[in-house]
Amino acid sequence: MTSFTPQNTQSISMQLRRAALLCLATWCAAGAASAAEPATVAQPPRVVVEGRAQLLDVCPGAETQIRQALEGAVWRNQIAIAMPVRFTLQGSRISEVEVGDGPKAYALRLRHALSGLQCSGPQQAAQVHAFSVDLLTS
């Protein structure tokens, strides 16, 4: 049997203290290293309406409304894509909305945004508006 003398007990106690101090030092060093690293902040999604000059002439708030309708969906789905859009405007009535292939979540929100646009064009002649909505995840 091994007997513990006061000298052996002190030696074990000292070893435990050293081990505890070593663990504490390692933990503090790891925390300092991670705090020194720059935090990566996810870039918000971007919704860019390409070919919008003619559209903004008749629908002044279109770009903002489209962006607001799609940013959340782009953030959640993280799918970058360019979606072609086409619709007919006669007076203030939007019809024949066509949205190109893309994720269903994007297409539904884009259609909804287009249906809510406040536009004013000539009453007698129908205008066809075509543009692209680029959905970028970074």
Image (cartoon, rainbow, N blue to C red):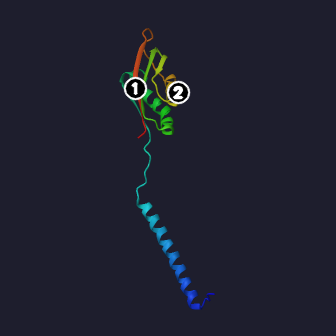
Quarter of the rendering containing residue 54: top left
Query: Which residue lies under the disc numbered 1?
Result: 132
Task: Work out whether residue 4 or residue 122 is closer to the camera in this orientation and state it.
Answer: 4
Query: Which residue lies under the disc numbered 2?
Result: 108
Residue situated furthest right in the rendering: 1
In the image, residue 35 above or below residue 92? below
At x 56% / y 88%, what residue is drawn?
8
Task: Work out whether residue 15 or residue 110 is closer to the camera in this orientation and state it.
Answer: 15
- How far apart marks 1 and 2 lie (CA) works out to 15 Å
x then y, percent, for residue 4: 61, 88
x then y, percent, for residue 19: 51, 76
In the image, residue 39 above or below residue 45? below
Q: Which mark is residue 69?
A: none
In which quadrant of the rendered image does the N terminus lie? bottom right
At x 45% / y 32%, what residue is drawn?
67
Q: Secondary structure at mark 1?
A: strand
x then y, percent, for residue 88: 45, 15
Residue situated furthest front in the rendering: 1
Q: Earlier in the sequence, mark 1 or mark 2?
A: 2
Category of crowding for the residue at label 2, using alpha-carbon neighbours closer than 10 angstroms: few (below 14), some (14–19), many (at least 20): some
Task: Work out whether residue 114 or residue 28 is closer to the camera in this orientation and state it.
Answer: 28
Q: Amino acid at mark 1?
A: Ser
At x 50% / y 79%, what residue is drawn?
18
Residue situated furthest top in the rendering: 124
x then y, percent, for residue 12: 56, 83
At x 40% / y 26%, what residue is drawn?
132
Q: Amino acid at mark 2?
A: Leu
Whether pointer 1 and pointer 2 mark residues with C-beta atoms closer than 8 Å, the reply is no
Q: Secondary structure at mark 2?
A: helix
Task: Work out whether residue 112 or residue 11 is closer to the camera in this orientation and state it.
Answer: 11
